[in-house]
Image (spheres, grey):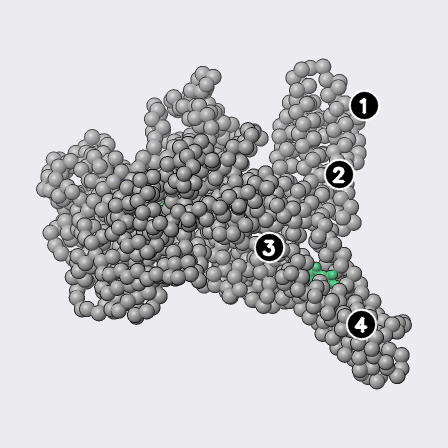
Amino acid sequence: MNNTNKVQIAIVGAGPGGLSAAARAAELGVSHVLFEQSPAHANTIQKYQKGKHVMAEPNVLPLRSPLRFEAGTREAILDEWARGLDKHAVNIRYGSEVTSISGSRPDFTLKLKSGEEYHAETVIFAIGMQGNPRRLGIPGEDLPCVQNTLDDPGEYSGEVIVVVGAGDAAIENAVALAKQNTVFILNRSAEFARVKEGNLNLILKSVEEGKLGCYYNAACVSLTAMPGADRPYTLVINTDNGEAVVPCNRVIARIGAIPPRKFVESCGIRFPSPDPAALPVLNERYESAVPGLYVIGALAGYPLIKQAMNQGYEVVEYALGREVEPADEPLLAKKFANLPFRKSVSETLALMQQRIPLFTEVNSLVFRELLLGSAVHVPAKGEAIFRKNDYTNSFYTIVEGTVEIELGAEGGPSRRIPLGAGQFFGEMSLLSGRRRSGTVYAGANCVLIESPRRDILKLMNSADSVRKVIDQLFIARAIQTGFAPGVPFDQLNSIAARAELKRYRKGETLFAEGDEADRLILIRSGSVSVSRRIGEHDVVISYVAAGNYVGEMGLLGKTRRNATVRATVPTEAVSLDATAFEELLVRNPALRAELETTMQKRFASNARMRGSDESGDLISFLIKQGLGEATDLLLIDETLCVGCDNCETACAETHGGTSRLDRAAGPTFANVHVPTSCRHCEDPHCMRECPPDAIRRAPNGEVYIQDNCIGCGNCERNCPYGVIHMAYAPAPKPGLASWLLFGAGSGPGDAHAGAHHGHAAHGAADGKPKAPKKAVKCDMCKDQSGGPACVRACPTGAALRVSPEAFVEFISESAVGR
Amino acid sequence: MHQSFLQYRGKRYLWWALSLCFVAVLAYAWHQPVSPPNGGTWLGYTLGTIGALLILWLTALGVRKRSYQSAVGTVQGWVSAHVYLGLALIVVATLHTGFQFGWNVHTLAYVLMMTVIVSGLFGVVMYLRFPERLSANRSSQTREQMLQEIADLDQRALRIAANLPAEFAEAIASNRDRTRIGGTVLDILRGRDRSQVSLAGDDGVLQVVPNPAQEHMLEWLGRQLSRSTDAERTRRIDELVNLMASRRSLLRRVIEDARIAGWLQVWLYVHVPITFALLGSLIAHVVSVFLYW
Ligand SMILES: Cc1cc2nc3c(=O)[nH]c(=O)nc-3n(C[C@H](O)[C@H](O)[C@H](O)COP(=O)(O)OP(=O)(O)OC[C@H]3O[C@@H](n4cnc5c(N)ncnc54)[C@H](O)[C@@H]3O)c2cc1C
Ligand code: HEM
Ligand code: SF4
Ligand code: SF4
């Protein structure tokens, strides 16, 4: 027995990464074992929605694995892999959760939950990021009536079902099940905190209407089978009013998942920072700090199936001490093809790392991944890399040659600051999500790396050295642009070093009315509201967007704050104390006068806003609707809107038949209506967790979704304003235009004109759509020549779009104007 | 920063329209034709051509409105010009006639044109008058949401009624099933509530009675409440009263919403079809003029 428990390679986790690794080991005839905690392979994919169309992004990346994988339905892919497992006679152990890994090459000990022990020379860790569903932790938790997922609520009817949990998933399941069943939801605390507003309303309403029962402050005590009883199980729970007994058919535990991090760390794998987004430290062969322990797949930071499968193949080669050219080699070679020098891919990478101090300490695997996502540019001399006020947010590093950054006010005098090899730029927009603050021109013989925002943020999260350098430079440059134009950089470093970078939660106070005024604060990302106590109430008088500063009054000789400043969204701010400020004044004597002018302007505009209480309420209302993070907000002036829905029709007609805007839905205040439509957030929530990085920001600020969307629905869940939905493209639109069409018949652009402008993928005629559902949202008509179709189509001028620059003007106008 | 279609670009098209009228009136006053002024003089032809072109262009709004890809101005700008130049047509076309009317196809075209214009003017009045009320009445809810809320109220009421004598459930259910909003165009525009309810009389006999604004329903519940001697029963009926009172205000809002929306649309059902009639008679007018000339 002991003999069979010793293998050359043990693989933990039978997701795409682990499966591919095991199949490769089997193909090579290496002794191996693959542990999978669940009863079937690829648990993450098993949990996808039934019939989901799985995509094989990135398309350009070739697949290298003994298992086959191409885009198709979840079922077809799982079947294919099951056949592959058989064909290669992979030694897979289902229902085998690995609970500890100790030792190092060549003697690892793996313990299973069952108590079994295995020994292996090397271990490949591929447990993904899904984590383990939290369990009820009560006697009876293993009974078959307990489940952690719900595929299809319609499957159950006439049952008594207890849903345990208080998150979005629990609420959505409970409400969906309540249509055909008697449902109780069990909340451990006294309210539903931390759920989306829509879900909060949904659950409170459902409970109030008696559609489902809810126990607050309730904990499960035990679950027992009651064969023969009316309801086959009994759940005992503890509530404020003592114990309650609930006879039931089913218990659905939606109490979250335990992130794998702790377990991973317990095996000796290190992470560079406590940030939950940090990735484990690995070398270029996926090997962790523990020799012989390899990490691949989603856990290693590669969020797509094909990447995980390729790594499964490669890692087995590495584990056997062999070299293999990574599958992405040709991709990089292509990127490097127009470089002015001829070197191999790895030589080029090494050269870049050596030339750019920012990347020198980064591990080469991470750097390679960064470059895979990046573009390499060889711009002609004088070419503009990006322009002032563009909304792009990628990050540039200079490999060779120089660039010039042109700063300065529009129409005013401008200055050009040269940057040389090894330096970087673009960090301002990267960090603040705001427009570019200057134009950058290429110098002679320039070679640049342009990296997408997401990849750089990922890098900053996993390499502290990178974060520090970028933060420092950001502060120095922010001070330079904001307060000391013309003062050379090296003179600002001492000031920058004293500046403090702070993060504030939504609603947190930066400083309060009456506090001592001893610092100047520069908002780096997010935004703040300024309010004053008037009588009993805190009245919002203004709103300050990222890139501006607050608190200048204090430093100009006034000693107490006359207003309270709060973060409207998660906000980062740089604060300068009085000493640093004194030093700045020495370097730039004109600064005092400048700040005084700003102050005067603010006074004037604050006074204007205070003209009516309504303006303050309107700001508060709009902030709640996302003003604080919007770069473009669609508003409807309800004094003008006649409800013709021409805006919606226009949106649908220009976007393959699906409107991305719901005009009537959404709240209204003081005749300003915020329809359900994208805010084009500065730091878009939807971009987070998009596996193929399909959500992008265009130079004019539009947040849009590219065709490589895999339809996972993460963005739909992450958007707090509920503006994304999943749709077949293009969907027929029932009845929307019906009354508009009377009499006039069909004019140009009518009826199905949208269809041939739509995406390539059409629903098949037989009603069974072949194309997958994809995420759709407002793209601000970035491909339309005249700008947003909704605004252009509004007959009365009720629909308008406002940018943050225009918010204050808009608010004072609409509040005072009536 | 943003303006209504009447204010559009500092009322630019109002000035255009006024200039057009001014020039037309001036020319008309200055012009001394041999015969009495009519469509056949050179000025008559000029005004007629301008008028016909204007009508064609005014009709083109319907096309522009549906050319969602079009970047030729904004629909708002078009509507602004449409309204002002459409009104200028009154002057242009009337002068074109030289005030010669009769029972013929020419005057028919004129009358149709005036009908379209008057209906347009009426529409503008509606557009200015109603949006704010529409919004206030909705108070951040869509009509679907209001209807959903009514449906939810009914469900809750039925659940409460389940613990009361059967006539309560009958009353609530019939109230739900016999709720009639909408109806003919006139009903909508007048905001009529044609709902009914079937209520048990004192003799226990069910009778269907009209129930506008939930009046009879509430009255009946009030009567039951005053007769109740049981505390638990009183509490339940009281809850029903509350629910039905909310139902009343919701229902009113739905009816009001449909009423306002109706007024905002109904004139277009005159404006557009008559536009087509006008185009027909305009062709007849032009053809006959050239044939019999
Ligand atoms: C809804 C959704 C849709 C997606 N759609 C796509 C798509 O269309 N295309 C695409 O390329 N990517 C898609 N992805 C991403 C893709 O699922 C992941 O990138 C991929 O599954 C990662 O593979 P992995 O092998 O690293 O980890 P996983 O697939 O997560 O596999 C980990 C496995 O390890 C097992 N395990 C965990 N802990 C233990 C333990 N202690 N002992 C034993 N076994 C353990 C788990 O049960 C699981 O089977 C989607 C993701 C989601 C959530
Ligand atoms: C002979 C003259 C006119 C003709 C032929 C004409 C024709 C039209 C047409 C075809 C439409 C498009 C309707 C649709 O497709 O939905 C329209 C809309 C409209 N017209 Fe006129 N019109 C005329 C005069 C006027 C006048 C004088 C006014 C106002 C004083 C006016 C006000 C409007 C308005 C407000 C709209 C609606 C815009 C909208 O909501 O989309 N029209 N007209
Ligand atoms: S989809 Fe939602 S999260 Fe994304 S930019 Fe728009 S409003 Fe923001
Ligand atoms: S765009 Fe949305 S649905 Fe599409 S892949 Fe990204 S997160 Fe998933």
Distance from the alpha carbon under mark 1 to that under mark 3:
64 Å
Which residue is located at x 66 percent, y 64 percent? Answer: B12
Which residue is tagged 3? B2
Q: Chain of mark 2?
A: B
| Of the two numbered discs 2 and 4 in the rendering, the one whose residue sits closer to the viewer | 4
Confirm whether circles 3 and 2 share one chain: yes
Q: Which residue is mark 1?
A: B203
Q: Earlier in the sequence, mark 2 or mark 1?
A: 2
Residue A266: x percent and y percent?
A: 21, 35
Disc 1 chain ID = B
Q: Is mark 3 within 8 Å of ligand 2?
A: no
Can you give x and y, in whole percent of width and height, for residue B266 in the image? 74, 55
Tag 3: amino acid: His
Which element type, helix, strand or loop, lies under badge 4?
helix
Q: Looking at the image, is mark 1 or mark 4 nearer the viewer?
A: 4
- The answer to whether marks 2 and 4 sit on the same chain is yes
Q: Indicate which disc, 3 or 4, sits on the residue closer to the N terminus.
A: 3
| Foreground pick, A334 / B92 | B92
Q: Nearer the viewer, mark 3 or mark 2?
A: 3
Q: Earlier in the sequence, mark 1 or mark 4?
A: 4
The kind of secondary structure element at disc 3 is loop
Q: Disc 1 vs disc 4: Cβ atoms closer than 8 Å?
A: no
Q: Which residue is mark 2?
A: B195
Residue A66 in view in this figure: no
Mark 1 or 3, which is nearer the eye? 3
Q: Is mark 4 within 8 Å of ligand 2?
A: no
Residue at the spot x=67%, y=15% of the render?
Answer: B231
Q: Are marks 1 and 4 on the same chain?
A: yes
Q: Which residue position is annotated with label 4? A: B25
